[in-house]
Image (tube, rainbow, N blue to C red):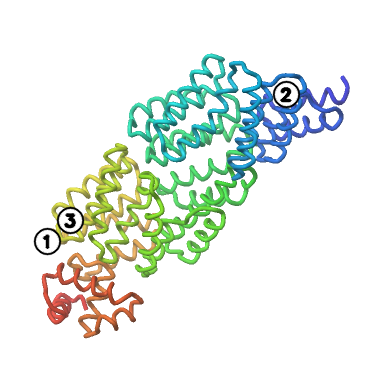
Amino acid sequence: MPDTARKLERGRTAYAASAWADAYESLAAADQFAPLGPEDLELLARSAYMLGRDDEYVGALERAHSAYLDADDVARAVRCTFWIGHNWMFRGAPARAGGWFGRGQRLLEELGQDCVERAYLLIPVWLEQMGREDFNAGYATAVEAAEIAERFGDADLMWAARDEQARALIGQGDVETGLRLCDEVFVVVARGELSPIITGILYCNTIIFCRDAFELRHAQEWTRALTDWCDRQPQMVAHNGLCLVHRAEFTQLRGGWQEAMEQARDAADRFTKGALNQIAVSKALYRQGEIYRLRGEFADAESAYREASRWGSDPQPGLALLRLAQGNGEAAAAAIRRAVTERTKPLERVALLPAYIEIMIDIGERERAAGACDELAEIADLQKSEVLNAMSAQQRGNLLLTEGDAGSALESLRVASRLWRDLQAPYEIACVRVLVGLACRALGDEDTAAMELEAARDAFEQLEAKPDYARVELLLSGVPATHGLTDRELEVLRLVAAGKSNREIGAALFISEHTVARHVQNLFTKLGVTSRTAAGAFAYEHKLA
């Protein structure tokens, strides 16, 4: 067998075995001796894709496209135009993507026959519709594509279209039907019934839309399957970055913060080739920032958030919560207000609302916090997600506690505690236990309050959540109850008790006089006093100053 034929055969064999580096090397070597035919060029292209070599992927597809046209196989040439455009779209080059999609559409019109490639060119249509959350239109387009794919026996396209139908159904609020269809897609993907590129795309796509809809149980199961798929292909590069980021998110939720940090670092340091991995880098850096923040390593957190921003991700709500933890409520409020205002889609806003509520409570903007609580509850009711219901109940309890209604707060907090326990989220459970402890203390039940706070403290210690641990230690150290005042309101009260004016307080705390006045009015309401003198007397009497 001539050397070229041996290299070509080795390349085809390696491709079939998912040995992507070996396949690419052998096929590229064979191509140097004699130009590959269009089908082998597609194998070369797909091997390059799985290695994150986007330029080589597109280059080989362009050659395959031309070769198919020369052979008068217009339909296969059109399919190449779709994949080229698809890659440019995810690389942030809409003009090039649109040009290739347009070329494919023109060739189809000139061909004038029904073929499955017509459905492939519906994919950018549904992606645009889903991107602007026009789920009705996206669903209809995906149904049309699935029908064409089924008629021509194209399993890749048919299941990709059904996966998008699941995404649209979840977006429309029909979560049960959407997840049922999502489960059906899962069986097909996990059994290895689809081609490698489509398999990787469906893994990443489904995890993202399940996670964005806060359907974490499904997202976690898909992530475990994606991990197994990646492990079976040690030479693969393309999907490893996003896989590691997803794993880090769920590992952190389960309390494995150090392991999650290592996974996020791995994603950012090792897997940077390819469009999907480029997306993963910013998310990996943000995840590092979150873990640093929760550990109290604020300088490292800020650095990670800034790097995430440089790679294209908005570092919110993490950066705003970092400012809050640093005692800069004004900066935190400005950042989170900006982020919430810019997000108009419900599921984008809901990711920010818990932080927004927490920050608004801290700066005394209870009406804004209440409005955000209502919005969060409405979205949770629509989506029927355990996570959203847990978040909503926790923040409602937080707000009610701040307003002095400890009894009602406890009802919400008990719901949140049960849901977070079902989701096995130790940090969130501990945060709720702190609020339960404060509610019990406000109701005069010091024994239960102490037990809840001690349990929360122990959980924070195990997680190495140093700021939270220190806060609970202070609550357990005999420092008197805060009577529903936020940390900022306590700072203002102490300065009021010291005889400082609003202007002096503002200068000391680096906030405006208007904000000081709002804090003063809030603490008057909570303490049941009507003057600065009475507030000062209350502070000294209850050892708050």
In this orientation, which residue lies closer to the viewer: 261 or 498?
498
Q: Amino acid at mark 3?
A: Thr
Of the 4 image quadrants, the one containing the C terminus is bottom left
- Specify the quadrant of the image occupied by residue 400: bottom left
Judged from the image, the secondary structure of the residue bearing numbered disc 2 is helix
Q: Are marks 3 and 1 in contact (CB under 8 Å)?
A: no
- 428 left or right, relative to 14: left
Residue, disc 3? 448
- 374 left or right, relative to 190: left
Residue, disc 2? 13
- 526 left or right, relative to 6: left
Q: Nearer the viewer, mark 3 or mark 1?
A: 1
Of the 4 image quadrants, the one containing the N terminus is top right
Judged from the image, the secondary structure of the residue bearing numbered disc 1 is loop
Q: Position of residue 122 (x, y in %)?
A: 53, 28
How far apart are labels 2 and 1 at the CA level?
74 Å
The first of marks 2 and 3 along the sequence is 2
How far apart are labels 2 and 3 at the CA level?
66 Å
Name the disc covering residue 444, or none.
1
Picture residue at 61% right of the left edge, 33% below the top: 101
Q: Residues within 10 Å of mark 2 (few under 14, many from 20)?
A: some
Q: Position of residue 484 (x, y in %)?
A: 19, 64
Q: Would residue 214 be seen by someone viewing this image from the given angle? A: yes
- Specify the quadrant of the image occupied by residue 401: bottom left
Which residue is at the far right?
Answer: 2
Q: Amino acid at mark 1?
A: Gly
Q: Residues within 10 Å of mark 3 (few under 14, many from 20)?
A: some
532 in relation to 138, above or below: below
Q: Amino acid at mark 2?
A: Thr
How far apart are labels 3 and 1 at the CA level?
9 Å
Judged from the image, the secondary structure of the residue bearing numbered disc 3 is helix
Q: Nearer the viewer, mark 2 or mark 3?
A: 2
